[in-house]
Image (cartoon, rainbow, N blue to C red):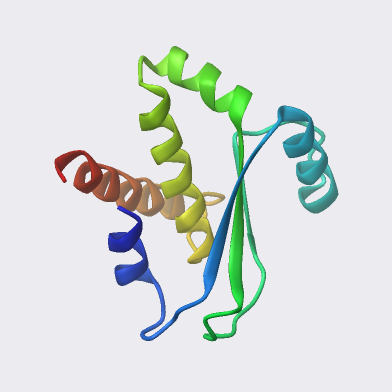
């Protein structure tokens, strides 16, 4: 799935790093408050960091709240790994410019997310 997303969405010849950080509700709440002015925990946050195509650059970071992901997996009847895949996919799409603030954008982002998750489940 990661390769499919980056092949489809990244600039050609891009070789930058994406950091994946698994952390706590408290950390996600702090990040959410600091960068989005929302005083609440969330499941995943993405941050674009560097636009360089150099292999040593960091394109972005994805933060996932482990406790929230675990609660959501139970609530959705999904395995932990399925929920983590969904959150990583969601975070990657944000790094590549997708958003869900407007309805049309949310529909497109969800469509892409479902496409990549289906690919991951097949392969």
| Left or right: where 14 falls relative to 39 | left
Q: Residue at x 48, y 60 (%)?
A: 98
Residue 13 x, y percent position in the rendering: 38, 86
Q: Residue at x 61, y 78 (%)?
A: 57
Of residues 31 and 80, which is closer to you in this image?
A: 80
Of residues 18 and 8, which is closer to you in this image?
A: 18
Task: Please say if 96 is above or below 43.
Answer: below
Quadrant of residue 74 in the image? top left
| Left or right: where 25 falls relative to 8 | right
Q: Residue at x 24, y 49 (%)?
A: 115
Residue 81 x, y percent position in the rendering: 39, 30
Total numbered circles: 0
Residue 118 x, y percent position in the rendering: 21, 42
Task: Please say if 45 is above or below 84.
Answer: below
Task: Please say if 5 is above or below 29.
Answer: below
Residue 16 x, y percent position in the rendering: 52, 75
């Amino acid at each position: 799935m990661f390769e499919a997303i980056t092949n489809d969405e990244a600039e050609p010849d891009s070789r930058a790093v994406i950091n994946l950080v698994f952390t706590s509700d408290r950390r996600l709440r702090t990040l959410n408050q600091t960068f989005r002015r929302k005083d609440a925990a969330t499941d995943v946050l993405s941050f674009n960091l560097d636009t360089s195509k150099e292999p040593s650059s960091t394109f972005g970071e994805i933060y996932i709240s482990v406790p929230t992901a675990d609660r959501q997996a139970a609530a959705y009847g999904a395995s932990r790994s399925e929920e983590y895949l969904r959150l990583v996919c969601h975070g990657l799409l944000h790094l590549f410019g997708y958003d869900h603030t407007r309805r049309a954008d949310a529909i497109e982002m969800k469509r892409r997310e479902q496409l990549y998750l289906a690919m991951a489940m097949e392969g």
